[in-house]
Image (cartoon, rainbow, N blue to C red):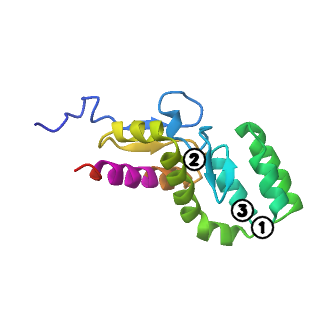
Amino acid sequence: MDAPSETSPDAQPIVFNGKKPEWGMLSNYSLHGFKYNDKLFPSVEHYLQADKFRDHELCVEEIRWTFMISDLHDIVEKLETDHPYSYEAWKERRIAAAERAISAKFDQNPHLKRILKSTGTRKLIDKTYKKDNDMNEITSAILTELRSNLLSEHI
């Protein structure tokens, strides 16, 4: 079988964010909940924001019970003022936190796992976060690795 040409749909990257429905389920903003340590999180973004405040249980609960992503960032901004956290410590653990959350999201939502597998070998490009935020690259890399593992399971 020939490799897809550069104009082939199979060669085109998949660009996604949390605002557009096409491929939006890949975004950390998508409201595809999952449980981690017996706690339900409405999205990966909820988990990531809660992990910043892991030592403040009330903050974690307030984040978990904030349903809308647009409200979530307002709540987190307020919590950051009232309950400062170490940004450096968060920066060191955020990749591992993203790996845990994204893995849990796809493990517990089999339809999302099928969708991720259906992307084949196309490049995944996350555009969820602002340009100055490297979580886009982190999420894209985690999803690409997860997809690779899923695709190799049946070989």
Q: Nearer the viewer, residue 100 or 86?
A: 100
Three-letter amino acid code at the position of disc 1: Tyr
Per the rendered image, the range of residues in magenta is 141-151
Q: Quadrant of residue 93?
A: bottom right
Three-letter amino acid code at the position of disc 2: Lys
Q: For the residues carrying marks 1 and 2, which lies nearer the camera in this image?
A: 1
Q: Earlier in the sequence, mark 3 or mark 1?
A: 3
Please report contact status of discs 3 and 1: CB closer than 8 Å, yes or no: yes
Q: Which residue is mark 1?
A: 85
Q: Earlier in the sequence, mark 1 or mark 2?
A: 1
Which labelled disc corresponds to residue 52?
3
Task: Name the residue: 11% across, 36% down.
Answer: 2
Q: Quadrant of residue 85?
A: bottom right
Where 106 sits versus 1, above or below? below
Residue 143 coordinates in the image, percent (x, y): 44, 50
Specify whether 9 is left or right of 41.
Answer: left
Majority secondary structure of the magenta segment?
A: helix
Specify whether 141 is left or right of 96.
Answer: left
Three-letter amino acid code at the position of disc 3: Lys
Task: Name the residue: 30% across, 48% down.
Answer: 151
Task: Name the residue: 85% across, 58% down.
Answer: 58
Which labelled disc corresponds to residue 131?
2
Mark 1 residue element:
loop
Q: For the residues carrying marks 2 and 3, which lies nearer the camera in this image?
A: 3
How many neighbours does mark 2 have within 10 angstroms: few (below 14), some (14-19), or many (20 or more)? few
